[in-house]
């Protein structure tokens, strides 16, 4: 029964997640057209992107009022479900869908994977309750289909499965494994009916690096670990800053966040949005060294700044863009000293994506497989492993918590409790004493 429900709900996750991503692609096209039109009016054209992103951020934040759990990424909420701390109500689904389109589609530097992971868990809960699945089986179903949502977001089924094991459940169990396998299979199959089947990033053949260069990748990973810790601090400080101005409505504060992103969109279009276009251009070698430095700084700040608004949206896609720019920048700077790096100009950019992911999220295996699937490249697995090792080691020695552990801890500090509005056979679900069902960011 559990596997049958996983298969059917997985198909729903694929269709909903595929439609969500398709609409975001259309929104990107419309935003690009608006920018092109606005640049014909240099004196006043900047008003258009500022108004667009400010309105999108405010609308997304307003929708959160109808389902506070829809705020932010949603990954931490799925993790809370696995720990028995919460179970998402069905109203999260439309709020996450519409709010994600408004915020991400307008130009906030947020990722599509947060909403698809959360929507996957909500669909799982909605499927499991009417069929009488007990609480443990519903937890398994939500963890499995949350991972399926990640796979749909990036067309990366193996990474989605590993996400369920490594990040959400942090364990391998036969029941969880079976449901994750069939749920991911049906979700990806259905999403490909809408989106097609090709890697997210088009990358030419990349040669495996010489053995002695592994030391270079270890050093690169160690430095990336420091930047990952800094990125996590920026995310949390951004949420704190947003919460200090409670005397103003949350929508007004979100509009201010969006207005700043609109200015960035006007001056540097690749600095806003999810970051896929920027990452693709970096992987294609189409950006100069000076521009790489600028985009690294811009994207390093834009992701945490956008997340502070509390609009529905994730962290994965923006931090992958940061990692690609960071790796390409280090390649450009190190190539004169290490000419051997010149034989594989894309290598450090690809490794940078998985390594920065590992440093921030602390799920290195998921990050490695995710980037291998997104780039259809397997020749860099060894340097990815070495760099991820160093990044996670450094971040751990610096005593920095994984970002979703920190966000989950904030759930119980910055939000009022949400009364349980779901029942199982007439009985309310039990929560551990002293816990609250809350959302990601401050009210």
Image: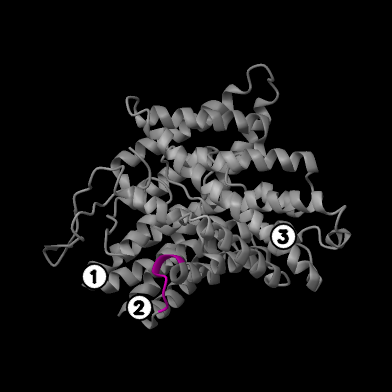
Residue 218 lies in the magenta-colored region: no
Q: Which residue is mark 2?
A: 4
Q: Pointer 3 and pointer 1: residues touching (CB < 8 Å)?
A: no
Q: Secondary structure at mark 1?
A: helix
1 and 2 marks in contact (CB < 8 Å): no
Most extreme residue toward the top is 43
The mark that comes first in sequence, 2 or 3, is 2
Is residue 70 shown above or below 168?
above
Among numbered discs 1 and 2, the one appearing first in the sequence: 2
Separation of disc 2 and disc 3 at Cα? 35 Å
Residue 197 appears anywhere in the view: no
Residue displayed at 34% across by 72% down: 140
Mark 3, other Cα within 10 Å: few <14 / some 14–19 / many ≥20: some
Q: Nearer the viewer, residue 299 or 145?
A: 299
Task: Residue under label 1, please give it.
Answer: 135
According to the image, label 3 marks what residue?
202
Residue 58 is labelled as none
423 w.r.t. 72: above or below: below
Circle 2: element type: helix
Q: Secondary structure at mark 3?
A: loop
Q: Residue 81 at what x, y percent from top left?
A: 31, 62
Q: Residue at 35%, 25% (x, y): give it.
A: 248
Tell me which residue sits at (42%, 39%) in the image: 239
Front disc: 1 or 2? 1
> Image quadrant of residue 337?
bottom right
Label 1: how many Cα within 10 Å (few below 14, some 14–19, many 20+): some
Magenta segment: 167-172
- Foreground residue among 101 and 211: 211
Query: Residue 122's spot in the image, x, y percent?
Result: 34, 59
């Amino acid at each position: 029964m559990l596997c049958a429900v996983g298969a059917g709900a997985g198909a729903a996750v694929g269709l909903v997640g595929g439609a969500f991503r398709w609409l975001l692609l259309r929104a990107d096209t419309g935003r690009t057209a608006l920018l092109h039109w606005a640049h014909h009016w240099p004196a006043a054209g900047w008003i258009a992107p500022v108004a667009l992103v400010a309105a999108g951020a405010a609308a997304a934040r307003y929708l959160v009022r109808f389902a506070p759990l829809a705020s932010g990424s949603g990954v931490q909420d799925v993790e809370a479900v696995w720990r028995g701390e919460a179970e998402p109500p069905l109203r999260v689904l439309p709020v996450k869908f519409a709010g994600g389109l408004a915020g991400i589609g307008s130009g906030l530097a947020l990722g599509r994977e947060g909403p698809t992971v959360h929507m996957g868990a909500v669909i799982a809960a909605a499927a499991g309750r009417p069929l009488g699945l007990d609480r443990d089986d519903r937890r398994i179903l939500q963890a499995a289909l949350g991972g399926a949502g990640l796979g749909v977001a990036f067309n990366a089924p193996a990474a989605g499965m590993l996400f369920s094991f490594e990040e959400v459940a942090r364990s391998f169990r036969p029941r969880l494994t079976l449901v994750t396998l069939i749920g991911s299979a049906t979700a990806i199959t259905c999403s490909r009916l809408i989106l097609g089947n090709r890697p997210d990033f088009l990358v030419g053949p990349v040669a495996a690096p010489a053995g002695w260069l592994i030391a270079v990748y270890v050093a690169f990973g160690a430095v990336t670990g420091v930047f990952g810790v800094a990125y996590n601090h920026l995310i949390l400080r951004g949420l704190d800053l947003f919460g200090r101005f409670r005397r103003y409505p949350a929508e007004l504060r979100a509009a201010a966040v969006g207005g700043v992103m609109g200015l960035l969109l006007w001056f540097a279009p690749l600095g806003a949005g999810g970051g896929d276009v920027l990452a693709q251009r970096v992987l294609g070698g189409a950006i100069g060294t000076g521009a790489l430095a600028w985009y690294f700084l811009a994207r390093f700040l834009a992701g945490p700044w956008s997340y502070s608004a509390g609009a529905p949206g994730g962290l994965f896609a923006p931090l992958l863009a940061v990692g690609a720019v960071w790796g390409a920048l280090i390649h450009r700077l190190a190539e004169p000293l290490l000419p051997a790096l010149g034989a594989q100009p894309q290598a450090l950019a690809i490794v940078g994506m998985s390594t920065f992911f590992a440093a921030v999220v602390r799920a290195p295996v998921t990050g490695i497989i995710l980037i291998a699937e997104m780039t259809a490249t397997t020749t860099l697995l060894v340097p990815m492993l070495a760099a991820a090792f160093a990044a996670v080691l450094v971040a751990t020695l610096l005593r920095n918590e994984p970002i979703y552990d920190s966000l989950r801890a904030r759930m119980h500090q910055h939000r009022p409790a949400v009364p349980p509005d779901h029942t199982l056979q007439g009985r309310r679900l039990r929560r551990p004493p002293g816990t609250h069902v809350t959302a990601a960011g401050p009210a």
